[in-house]
Amino acid sequence: MSRASSARVVFVGGAVLVAAFTLIPVSAQAPVSPAAERLPVRRVVLYKSGIGYFEHLGRVRGNQDVTIEFTSGQLDDVLKSLTALDLDGGRVASVNYNSDPGVERRLSALRLSLGPSATRTDVLRALRGARVETRSGATTITGRLLNVEQQQRRVDGAVTTVDAVSLITNAGDIRTVALDSGVTIRIMDADLNEEVGRYLSIISSSREQDVRRLTISTAGQGERDLFVSYVSEVPVWKSTYRLVLGTAGGGTTPVAPVLQGWAIVDNTIGEDWTNVELSLVAGAPQAFIQRISQPYYVQRPIVPLPERVLMAPQTHQGSLTTAGAGSIAGIVTDNAGGALPGVTVRVIRDGSLTGTTVTDGRGWYRFSGLTAGNYDVAATLSGFRTATASGVRVSGGAETALNHTLEVGQMSESLAVSAPAPVAASEPPASRGVRGGRAGGAGSVLDRVESAQAALQASATGEELGDLFEYRLKEPITILKNQSALVPIVNGSVGAEKVSIWNAESTSSRPLRAVWVTNTTGQTLDAGSVSIVEGQAFAGEGLIESLKAGERRLLSYAQDLSMTVTAGGDPTPARLTRVQLTRGVLIQQREERQRRTYTARNDDQQPRTLVVEHPVRAGWTLGGDLTPVETTPTVHRYRVTVAPGTTSTFTVEETRTTDTRVVVASITDNQVQVWSTGGLLDPATLASLREVLRRKAVVADLSAHVQAREMETATIARDQERVRENMKSLKGTAEERQLVQRYVRQLDAQETRLEALRTEIASLTTQRNDAQAELNRFIEALGG
């Protein structure tokens, strides 16, 4: 093993080693040094978060360059995490990679303002002013291209549209030539011909293979080991298992169930994995994407040249607004920083559309003539998510710069891969029927298969890796680039008990066939699919979550057609179980009780173990004779054995206690009567409650007397007001004077009664308040 092999470097979080070298991006057209050699992959660690840790180790001599190839999507991760070490006294001089400014950026550097999807009309409009020659049959016209326009023609009643170019000849004539079939246009300007050629070269380069080549330059004497490590985006590795159940020698003696685990690994990084050390980690450390390999450009403001001021008499208009019109301008790009033409940009103010425009070939847009205020700007393009900026401030006489980056919408793609077949126990091409259809006895195929299963050894070692778990293959493995493979990670016996499982909330009366798997492999089993093989025949398949060593888990794989399970409820009305008096509060305790009966019928000739999942309900306490064998956050699991051809029944009881609080001061005669007949109150408490009722009656009686006298007082007051009004209307005749004297005697009697009433009200109010205070003190003392 080399010196680098003894140093184990595993990417677990965001930490990376940093070597002393310089990263130098080179142009996409820069050739690779002919002396550069490939640095082979030595070790690979794959994680569930879609990243992989890679180690390269190779020999270099003198000042030598080595290369590693990636895709553009992988380069960002590599630049974030790259570690390069010359292990024998040399040094890493530099690291170069071919950068890609993007098609849009390279097109923007051309004199021709053309986008990547330019049509013939777009090209001709970009050539306005150039010398061209048109030829149609024997007719040739030479001149400068003035414009391109469309003409409509009517042929046999149908209207068609054709492009037509306008030329200005050397003689000053303006000629229009329709671009019908057979008409050719030749560019007379050699420079423009070269520019068109450069445009086509850039468009063609966008279809080239996406390869980023990392070149590492080393400096030193003699032969040395060069070590390079990094993190790269990779497909997520998947787990899949085979659980083999059976009996020995074709008889009834059970053999230990065997669990075979495989990992599906895809090599898409652009390098062959030849004899690499492969580790698979059952965990997902945090990882993110940062586009640091993409060249970024800062938009600079455009400052116009100063204009010459003419010193001439001027007039100055009166002010109508405080500032001139403003504008909004910017560039729309994709995630990679490439400009997006054809993007619809809308400006909205106060919910009303103010303007709409479309980005040009450089992704540029501009709105002018906007009054000062706040605007909402939205950029939309098919296949991308709409980008919206709210509250964009526009000032009068100024331009607001606003760029947009559009995120690509959700996409799906199908990838077909081929892989070397995994090594498996040999079997003849005979029919894979049930055990009854195969010959038993010593030396039979069935015996040989079971012997091979018993002799299986794990192909990978497992160990804890911090909070994660690592499967490390014992032998190096080879997976060519753009190939996939099944990699063995687990071979060992496990505990497996066959059961039938039924959930109380299931809509089917048929339970599921399941295996209660106990992980005795000593390794953590990653989540994945499990295929069940029983009696050398496929029995079903299911899914299992991550399983720690020693942990037990149910795995359902088929429907059990031999059993039927039903459930029936038996709710009981809530009953009052206890009444307690504490500090003036009466606490009533009620008990709810529910019974749920499960009935299972076994039509098989063998006994069945049934696991019934009963829902966990907050606040309810389990009762009854049967105790659940285990409880999950959502269900209690009850285990029963059902004999062949019989029906078994068991009942789950649940109780829930609820409290109701009643303030003693508000109790009624009916409530006390109920509590007394139910025998829930002791005699002393019952006597206290009746004393409370008596004292409340006293207070109520005093309150009634006070209320009656207050009503009488109010009646007298209204009558006096009526009498006084009548006295005001009397004129002084003899009869009227007699009536006045009568009214005076009436008022005098009423005043006497009012004085007596006020005295009685005051006395009764004092008695009532005292009685209420005594009642309150009595209640406070109850149950204290």
Image (tube, rainbow, N blue to C red):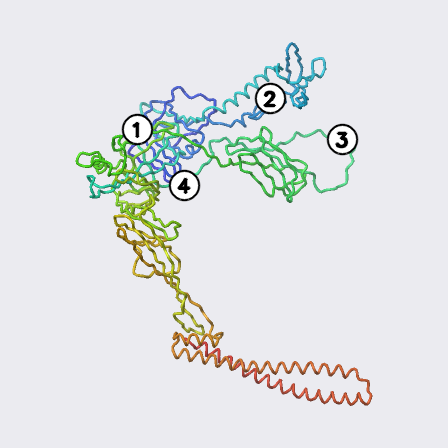
Q: Earlier in the sequence, mark 1 or mark 3?
A: 1
Above or below residue 621? Residue 443 is above
Which residue matches tag 2? 120
Quarter residue 177 falls in = top right
Q: Are marks 4 and 3 in contact (CB under 8 Å)?
A: no
Task: Provide the secondary structure element on which disc 1 rests.
Answer: strand
Mark number, residue 275: 1
Task: Provide the secondary structure element on which disc 3 rests.
Answer: loop
Quarter residue 582 falls in = bottom left
The quadrant of the rendering that contains the N terminus is top left
Q: Is residue 475 left or right of residue 779?
A: left
Q: CA distance from mark 2 to mark 4?
A: 49 Å
Residue 784 visible, this orientation: no
Which residue is painted at 66% across and 29% down in the image?
Answer: 305
Residue sitting farthest toward the left:
442
Q: CA distance from mark 2 to mark 1?
A: 54 Å
Number of other residues with Cα within 10 Å of mark 3, as a class: few under 14, some 14 to 19, many 20 or more: few
Q: Horizontal and vertical percent for residue 580?
A: 40, 72
Q: CA distance from mark 1 to mark 4?
A: 29 Å
Which residue matches tag 3? 311
Above or below residue 756? Residue 505 is above
Q: Earlier in the sequence, mark 2 or mark 1?
A: 2
Which residue matches tag 4? 286
Mark number, residue 355: none
Q: Nearer the viewer, mark 2 or mark 4?
A: 2
Task: Provide the secondary structure element on which disc 2 rests.
Answer: helix
Q: Earlier in the sequence, mark 1 or mark 4?
A: 1
Number of other residues with Cα within 10 Å of mark 4, as a class: few under 14, some 14 to 19, many 20 or more: few
* Amino acid carrying mark 3 in the image: Met
Q: Horizontal and vertical percent for residue 721?
A: 71, 81
